[in-house]
Amino acid sequence: MAKVIIKLENDISTDDIYPGRFMATVLPTETPQFAFFDRTEFNAQLKAKAFAPGSIIVGGENFGCGSSREQACSTLKGHDVAVIAKSISRIFLQNSINLGLQVVICPGLEASEGDDLEITADQVINKTTHKVFDQVKLPAARKGIMDAGGLIPYTRARLMAKG
Amino acid sequence: MGMTVVEKILARAAGLPSVKVGDVVEPKVDLAMSHENAALVINQFQEVFQGTGLPAKVWDPSRIAIIFDHRVPAESPKTATNQKKIRGFVADHGITKFHDIRGDVGGICHQILPEYGYVRPGYVVVGTDSHTTSHGALGAFSFGIGATEMASVWSLGIAVNIEVPATIKVVVKGEFPPFVGPKDLILHVIGKLTAQGANYKVLEFHGETIRKMSTSGRIAICNMSVEAGATSGIVPGDAETLRYLREEAGVTDPIPCVTPDLDASYVQTLDIDVTRLVPQIACPHMVDNVKPIGEVVGTRIQQIVIGSCTNGRLDDLAAAADILRGKKVAQGTRMLVFPASSKIFAQALDKGYVHDLMKAGAVVMNSGCGPCLGVHEGALGDHEKALSTTNRNFKGRMGNPTGEVYLCSPAVAAASAITGVITDPRKG
């Protein structure tokens, strides 16, 4: 079980998650400091480690739209948060799977900041309101990458198999 | 059942007789493009090879393109050091399609790729930039990926686990009225579809208006297809594609085109008549917040930007120069112009456009992404408004979260520069 630490609107762009002016910073070890930088208070809380590992960011439709910048995923992964959204933009979803950031698509989700959620294999249970919501399964094509623990180990295994 | 253009391209690239929506394929990649974020790709690429005992060699250095454009010349020691690291990698791996910060062959990646004939109809093109959709303008299936996925492409030469996307057919007819063009068309389409209306889908453009449209205009519409969420935009290769590649890109080898089957299956068809289209404006802070210009005329603007991978081409600069020739940029408004490539800059010099724009008061900058992504060159002051021919207006996009960005065509930007407020060029 984990807490909803922020509830965001529809169409959260990767510029919002990781502003363009920090794009010269690329390493996953360095990107977390700039997560949601222009949401000053939330950024400060993340940096102060105010949230338990596995805490949840709730998004609306089209979460992660815009730029392909992978920093938008590594910055969130660095804070060990998960994302549950009604729908997720293609490149952000793929980047999340590639990097092993936990993302869940849950079109009917009703949750407020502070609610406790449990993510099961195919549902999201709101323990605060006692409501249950179905997940949309992530693209089956991505399963091999997730099972390998991300695209780097997956590609490494493919390379080794090729010899 | 017949196939769409993208289905045909993916079938060919995956070595299959046919594919259908939802199939999972691993297409061979014909061209893999990165810009400054190649610094991260290199990092991930080296990690892939760690512990394998295999030499960390890219699959095919002739199919990798690296173009510096996002922060040129470097705005910080950090960027300069990343660029230095990439130059070293390029030399070590023998990557030939490399465009450094130069006044002869430099420019924005989404202009350089077409300009040098790197993209051909039927290609599978991937790029670590969401606006890689641009290259659909030449009949390629071209889409954005992240840096780690690019590291995988550099290692294996294929895009792993690609699901064949559904296609929306966009049929455009009619002749554009004066001062209305491709940018207004694509803003109108995005407004209709919404920012997620084409998520996980391809926009395939057809119709007499598209057939008559220049490659420059087609790049603008494919470029912004991603703003409706599309995996890619695509204009099936035709006579104009061949003309552009032969005459402007200097391609001499055979150029086969891929066209959709007549009985191809589309998930949706969008019919648009541009005969009565008016200039369109995407208002803050979403690209799908599109309004006809009449609703925002008179809005005071502090910064006008003409340029970017969307609208920094010769015809865009010509449209601006034609409107600004002999006029002055309004006091209290600054105008920045970023040609999409050094070649276009030189052409604009030869044709006198640069002179016209400078004499009017515009600052003509080196080609590059400029202020579009808010890193350097033209950040907004607190609560300032920009009117820009670029492709995104998200909050903070031009470097200041209190700023506001309106998106428009070059004609609207130029007409508004003279008055300092959003101005309809048809009434200028």
Image: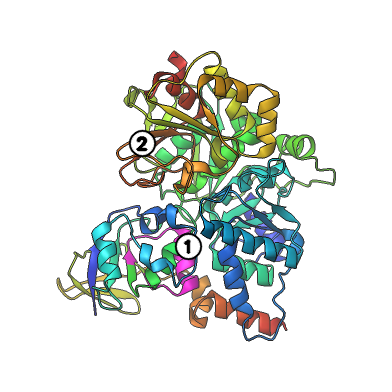
Give the letter of the chain under mark 2.
B
Question: Looking at this rendering, what residue extends furthest in the right direction?
Answer: B253
Q: Is residue A77 above or below residue B164?
A: below
Q: Which residue is mark 2?
A: B283
Judged by depth in the image, the label closer to the viewer, 1 or 2, is: 1
Residue B380: x %, y % from top left: 38, 40
| Kind of residue at disc 1 | Thr
The quarter of the picture where residue A119 lies is: bottom left
Q: Nearer the viewer, residue B18 or B45?
A: B45
Quadrant showing the C terminus of chain A: bottom right
In reply to whether residue A99 is colored magenta, the answer given is: yes
Q: Which residues are magenta?
A: A84-103
Q: Which residue carries the number 1 mark?
A: A25
Q: Looking at the image, can residue B32 be seen?
A: yes
Residue at (60%, 55%) from the top-left corner? Answer: B35
Q: Position of residue B354 (x, y in %)?
A: 61, 25
Up-down: is B71 above or below B94? Answer: above
Q: Amino acid at mark 2?
A: Cys
Q: Under tag 1, what secondary structure?
A: loop
